[in-house]
Amino acid sequence: MKVELKKGATLKMPAHCLSLARGESNQFYASCFDGGIYSVPKTRWKKPVMLAEHQNYASGVNWSPAARHLISAGYDGRLLWTNPDEKKITREVKAHDFWSWQSAISPDGTRIASSTGQYLCGGHKYEPAPEKEPSVKVFEVHTGKQTHAFEHVPPVESVAFSNNGKFLAAGNLMGEVRVWDLTTGTEAARIKTANFTGWGIIKGHYFTGGVFALAFSPDDSEIFLAGMGSTRDPAAGNGKQLWERWKWQGGKVEKTGSANDGEIGQGLMETLAFHPGGKIFAMAGRLFKGQWNTAIFDLETGSRLAHADTKMRVSKAIWNEEGSRLYLAGSSGQPKERKDLEKPDWGRIKVLEVEIS
């Protein structure tokens, strides 16, 4: 298989984009640092339109085809239901006492999950303190009613539904992924890996990293994890670009592969996205050192097929419906001072044209 990446359009957004969702007819929506939920323009000379607003960072946005609504999550701990056609918030749910790290919609659009948790020192080894509320919660989209509340070790940075919608996975700072059966409400598997978490001894003493992104393989037999390899300097972000794959079904948890050292550099990987065809996947994030911050991998072999340095921090990658374009949401640079957050239009959505042969 051969994959070629070509530079496509670049769209300016009001602030860093933390998440991206695809709605009907390849209409995309973004959630941003300024709290805004935006309709993404299809041409670069048009402006994004704010549809709703959180009281703090908007960490996630999801499209429910079942309800034809956007459901967003934020650092204000709220979930907002928004009708994009009317630009109107139709429901609000206080999901967490702390912020929502990440949110995910079930494949049929009937459930929304959100993860939370604050990293507080729990002992002399700086291990995380126990959670103050359930770290993962699931809500019905049509009613806003909470259906599940799952315990984990906070902070829980990532959450994902299986493709059949029957299971939910969530990963935390310490490299632990828990999988629950949504039919029975019981834990189905637990993955533990130390490869995504580092203990800082330079410039600060604390754990850093964690499982930043999760995705079930197309047949749900494996779970893919993404983040950054261990680093001793929490402030640098110089751990290796990393993904791992794990089998989790049948009562046996087993690591089945990971990124090849010769094909990666250094930097925090924030997002994973499987291609609609199911044979390749994308991983993207921040580049500290190396050749790329966005790469395409072969699902079967794990080999890197294509890569690009997009000169931006990528927090979310998502394919268009046809799989011919990869949309990358983030910003053109990491703010160094508070005043940098107030600069206009520093958010970015870049499009890569993808040719597969």
Image (cartoon, helix red, strand yellow):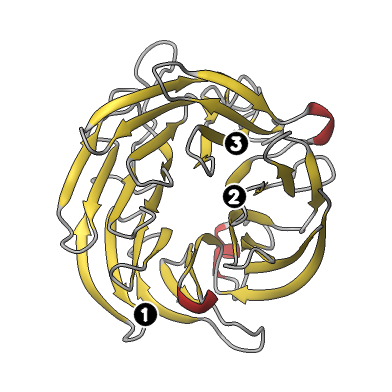
Q: CA distance from mark 2 to mark 3?
A: 16 Å
Q: Closer to the observer: label 1 or label 2?
A: 2
The percent position of residue 193, horizontal first and vertical second, equals 53, 20
Is residue 47 visible to us here?
yes
Position in image of residue 24 (x %, y %) = 46, 76
User: In the drawing, does residue 59 fall left or right of residue 287?
Assistant: left
Residue 73 versus residue 85 in the image, above or below: above
Quick check: 22 above or below 310? below
| Marks 1 and 2 in Cβ contact (< 8 Å) | no
| Foreground disc of the pair 3, 1 | 1
The amino acid sitting under disc 2 is Phe
Residue that carries the numbered disc 2 in the rendered image: 274
Whether 322 is drawn above or below 204: the answer is below
| Residue 336 visible (yes or no) | no
Q: Is residue 18 above or below residue 219?
A: below
Q: Which residue appears at 20% of the width and 69% of the height? A: 91
| Residue in front for this viewpoint, 305 or 228 | 305
Residue pointed to by mark 1? 84
| Residue at the top extreme of this rendering | 124
At 40% across and 10% down in the image, what residue appears? 124
| Mark 3, residue position | 227
**Residue appearing at x 30%, y 67% in the figure:** 66
Q: Quadrant of the C terminus?
A: bottom right
Q: Which amino acid is tagged 1?
A: Pro
146 sits to left or right of 119: left
Report helix, strand or loop for mark 1: loop
